[in-house]
């Protein structure tokens, strides 16, 4: 599903974002990316959703080779992904349901199908009753749930979460994490970057640890290599 | 939940950010108003020069005793010149009568004449596009070729000065016009860029959820076109108000000063729409490249 093969990123100013990273994430896996700020977690995530291309090596996501993606293919890849950020990235002037519907509208989904799909996604994240509310009327945890609903509404193969609990309190963090587990249980690959080592330890999911742009630990290296 | 079409999206922006939208429309309006005023002045100046140029006339004096048949034949020949709009043959008697009528101070002198000293002449008005020194000179040269033409006059110095004035007006108009247009494009471009930057987050979210660039551009282009139309209408309205006030102040009754015609207003509107569309397209594409 996701394969990194000796991937490096060097920015224009000579700074390395990632050095010789290799790993494989098979279908259905939940993976934590851990490491300090600047370790390379966000670089890996941005490569997965093709925000940038590798300087060296190869990244393959859901059948797409990132370094060879054309401008037209990038939206097609992103429609197979769901992306969640620490700062939620919701549009304040749209209601909760409009924020979720937005992801369907921009991909040209049939208008008649949109309300049902939106309600299904909001029900999944437990916010169906707040569909008509605005993001500013919701708590941080609820806003992140809306962002997850938006990421889910296109039935993505992969869900990318960049520090999704970074702005949340303990209770909300547990709630969001539980939601991500449920999504993963449905067969969606979840790749989550986090600083929360307690969360990582409690779950026992595969962990890829990064330090100065290098993969220094991968708890699932045997499973990953064995996967088809 | 209402379905959001690109047009609805564009219209919602005006509802959501009324101040910024009004500012950008005002910026387009005022920039085009400045250009419009300049072209209004240029238009009226050109018209004034055209009115002056109507006085460009070539007069060919005919030798005394030229037979009527020769004059008739020459009338046909000269009328056939491509530069000639109108030709009038003034007989010696008509010339004297006109002198008596128009030159009041010499009326006494003309009254007691035993012999009419004034020659007959061809008075030739040129077509508007030929009312310059070069063409007047060419017509004069051709007229001098007729054996019965004694002398040809067309106010050479005056026509040459008019030519210089026209050239100067055209050059100054072009330079200042381009400068005004360039400044307007920059101001409008910056204003539109601000409105796009204000929606940078929205653009980046659109891209992340898989919107194509053309989908993202749609509402921005519609918004730019609407702003262009409103800005253009505002500019024309302000030009009209200024023009009316000026006309009233100068006591013009509506015959001397002119306002834009339909074609000029259409060009102005197209420029406004083009600048709205172009500004939006450039700003959105810059934003798309940066997210």
Image (tube, coloured by chain):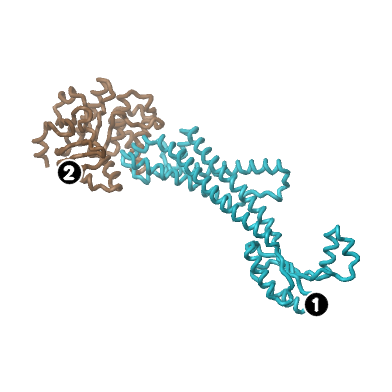
Chain colours: A brown, B cyan
Q: Residue B170 vs residue B207: left or right? A: right
User: Is any atom of residue A25 visible in this view?
Assistant: no
Q: Tell me: A157 left or right of B132.
A: left
Residue A184's place in the image compared with B212, above or below, is above
Q: Residues within 10 Å of mark 2 (few under 14, many from 20)?
A: some
- How dense is the environment of label 1, judged by Cα within 10 Å: few (below 14), some, or many (20 and up)? few
Q: Which residue is mark 1?
A: B65
Q: In front here: B279 or A171?
A: B279
* SS type, badge 1: loop
Q: Image quadrant of residue B62?
A: bottom right
Name the image quarter holding residue A15.
top left
Report how many numbered discs are placed on residues in the image: 2
Instruction: Please name whichever residue, B258 or A183, is drawn nearer the observer in this view of the structure.
Output: B258
| The label number, if any, that marks residue A183 in the structure image | none
List x then y, in percent, for residue B41: 62, 47
Residue A197, x across and y down, in percent:
18, 24
Position above or below: B276 against B64: above
Q: CA distance from mark 2 to mark 1?
A: 104 Å
Q: Nearer the viewer, residue A207 or B31?
A: B31
Q: Which mark is residue A57?
A: 2
Left or right of A105 in this view: B113: right
Residue A77: image location, x then y, percent: 26, 43
Residue drawn at point x = 21 percent, y = 42 percent:
A54
Quarter of the image where one finds residue B66: bottom right
Q: Nearer the viewer, residue B86 or B269?
A: B86
Subunit that carries the residue with mark 2: A
Q: Secondary structure at mark 2?
A: strand
Mark in the foreground, 2 or 1: 1
Q: Position of residue B167 (x, y in %)?
A: 59, 55
């Amino acid at each position: 599903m996701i394969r990194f093969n000796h991937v490096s990123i060097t920015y224009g100013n000579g700074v390395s974002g990632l050095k010789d990273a290799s790993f494989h994430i098979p279908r259905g896996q939940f993976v934590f990316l851990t490491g300090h700020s600047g370790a390379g977690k966000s670089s890996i995530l941005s490569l997965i959703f093709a925000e940038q291309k590798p300087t060296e090596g190869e990244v393959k996501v859901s059948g797409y080779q990132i370094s060879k993606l054309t401008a037209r293919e990038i939206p097609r890849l992103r429609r197979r992904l769901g992306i969640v950020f620490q700062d939620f990235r919701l549009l304040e002037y749209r209601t909760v349901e409009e924020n979720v519907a937005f992801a369907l509208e921009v991909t040209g989904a049939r208008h008649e199908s949109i309300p049902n799909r939106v309600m299904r996604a909001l029900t999944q994240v437990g916010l169906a009753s707040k569909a008509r509310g605005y993001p500013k009327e919701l708590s941080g945890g609820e806003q992140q749930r809306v962002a997850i609903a938006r990421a889910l509404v296109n039935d993505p193969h992969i869900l990318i979460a960049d520090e999704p609990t970074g702005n949340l309190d303990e209770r909300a963090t547990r709630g969001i994490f539980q939601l991500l587990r449920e999504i993963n249980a449905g067969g969606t690959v979840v790749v989550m970057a986090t600083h929360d080592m307690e969360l990582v330890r409690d779950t026992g999911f595969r962990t890829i640890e990064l330090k100065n742009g290098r993969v220094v630990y991968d708890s699932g290296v045997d499973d990953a290599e064995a996967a088809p | 939940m209402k379905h959001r079409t690109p047009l609805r999206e564009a219209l919602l922006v005006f509802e959501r950010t009324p101040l910024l939208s009004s500012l950008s429309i005002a910026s387009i309006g005022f920039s085009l108003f400045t250009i419009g005023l300049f072209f209004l002045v240029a238009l009226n100046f050109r018209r004034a020069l055209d009115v002056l140029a109507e006085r460009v006339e070539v007069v060919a004096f005919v030798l005394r005793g030229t037979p009527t048949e020769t004059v008739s034949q020459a009338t046909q020949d000269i009328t056939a010149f491509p530069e000639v709009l109108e030709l009038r043959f003034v007989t010696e008697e008509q010339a004297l009568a006109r002198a008596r009528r128009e030159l009041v101070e010499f009326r006494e002198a003309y009254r007691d004449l035993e012999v009419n000293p004034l020659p007959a002449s061809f008075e030739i008005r040129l077509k508007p596009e030929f009312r310059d020194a070069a063409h007047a000179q060419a017509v004069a040269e051709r007229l001098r070729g007729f054996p019965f033409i004694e002398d040809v006059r067309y106010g050479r110095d005056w026509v040459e000065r008019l030519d210089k004035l026209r050239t100067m007006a055209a050059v100054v108009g072009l330079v200042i016009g381009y400068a005004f247009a360039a400044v307007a494009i920059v101001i409008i471009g910056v204003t539109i860029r601000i409105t796009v930057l204000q929606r940078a987050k929205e653009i980046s979210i659109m891209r992340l959820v898989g919107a194509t660039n053309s989908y993202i551009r749609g509402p921005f282009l519609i918004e730019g076109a609407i702003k262009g139309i409103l800005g253009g209408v505002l500019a024309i309205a302000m030009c009209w108000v200024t023009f009316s006030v000026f006309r009233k102040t100068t006591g013009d009754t509506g015959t001397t000063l002119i306002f834009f015609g339909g074609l000029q207003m259409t060009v102005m509107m197209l420029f406004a729409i083009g600048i709205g569309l172009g500004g939006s397209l450039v700003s959105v594409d810059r934003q798309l490249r940066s997210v």
